[in-house]
Image (spheres, grey):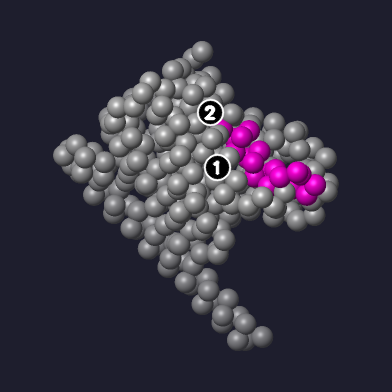
Amino acid sequence: MSPFLGELVGTALLIIFGAGVCAGVNLKKSYAANSGWIVITMGWGLAVAVAAYAVGKYSGAHLNPALTVALALSGDFPWGDVPMYVIAQVLGAMAGATVVYLHYWPHWKETDDPAVKLGVFATGPAVPNPAANLLSEIIGTFVLVLAILAIGANRFADGLNPFVVGFLIVAIGLSLGGTTGYAINPARDFGPRLAHFLLPIPGKGSSNWSYAWVPIVGPLLGGALGSLVYKALFLGKASPALWGALIAAAAVLAGVGMVHRKERESAAAERRST
């Protein structure tokens, strides 16, 4: 199996299990309906572990553009292979989302709320606030990449690393996932969101493209920071790129916050004038 196919298959498996648990918990007339957030976080953690076990020896099981870019920044992955990996991850995520759509075929009509249907495929904010939502994704992915690199520096029994990383995903979901649904992976959100847009899902509503940039930009910034901070703190190899990443993250957050504040002020002014 080629690395491209490994990333495609692995990311498809990730979404089949991950979006699948979201569908099982949230769609009407599923036996798993309303089983809660802990079930969702466990499902995603096991999804990552299974996908990593399946394709780790073929591609390294990045399954996440933020991790691929972070490894390239740290010098552990060739930049020339980044586009191939990202394309494979997005295509795999779309394929996995399509399988989930087919698997839950009769449940879409039984579920009235379009937001619930979108939530099977893509993430969204519990409290819409672009700067805060972006910060949540930055922090979640920072922790993800920093912890993955730290875990990789330990010696475990053969084959145990993917299982440990799976529990890391559960921990991030339980502790940090309640704000935005913890995409922490641009392909995990963009691929299924695009599938939601294209698939003939009954009563599906909007794909919420106005939010779609947050689970792309946030994880990329957070992953880059996680990689560079790991090198500086754990390996003693501080890089000028770390300051660049910090400045970029601060500038993006400040800009988003300013735009959001102006939008709120404009909306308040309109309400006062009516």
Q: Regarding mark 2 in the picture, which secondary structure is present there?
A: helix
Q: Tell me, yes or no, if residue 17 can be seen here.
A: yes
The residue type indicated by label 2 comes to Val
Classed neighbour count for the residue bearing mark 2: other residues with Cα under 10 Å, few (<14), some (14–19), many (≥20): some
Compared to 113, does 274 lie above or below?
Answer: below
Residue 71 in picture, x, y percent from top left: 34, 32
Describe residue 74's horizontal placement relative to residue 115 as left or right.
left
Q: What residue does disc 2 label?
A: 50
Q: Which of the 4 image quarters holds residue 254?
A: bottom left
Q: Earlier in the sequence, mark 2 or mark 1?
A: 1
Residue at image location 76% in from the left, 44% down from the top: 30
Who's the residue at 42% across and 49% down the image? 140
The three-letter amino acid code for the residue at tag 1 is Met
- Answer few, some or many: residues within 10 Å of disc 1's Cα (few below 14, many 20 plus, some between 14 and 19): some
Mark 2 and mark 1 in contact? Answer it, CB < 8 Å. no
Q: Is residue 191 left or right of residue 201?
A: left
- The quadrant of the picture occupied by the C terminus is bottom right
What kind of secondary structure does the magenta stretch mostly adopt? Answer: helix
Q: Which mark is residue 42?
A: 1
Closer to the camera in the image, 272 or 147: 147
Residue positioned most to the front: 157
Viewer-proximal residue among 20 and 272: 20
Q: Tag 1, which secondary structure?
A: helix
Based on the displayed image, in which of its 4 quarters is residue 104 positioned? top right
Please give the range of residues in magenta.
14-32
Instruction: From the top left corner, tell me how far across and down residue 68 is, in percent.
Output: 40, 32
x, y (%) of residue 112? 80, 54
Q: How many marks?
A: 2
Quick check: is 37 in the magenta stretch? Answer: no
What percent of the width, then of the height, locates residue 225? 32, 46
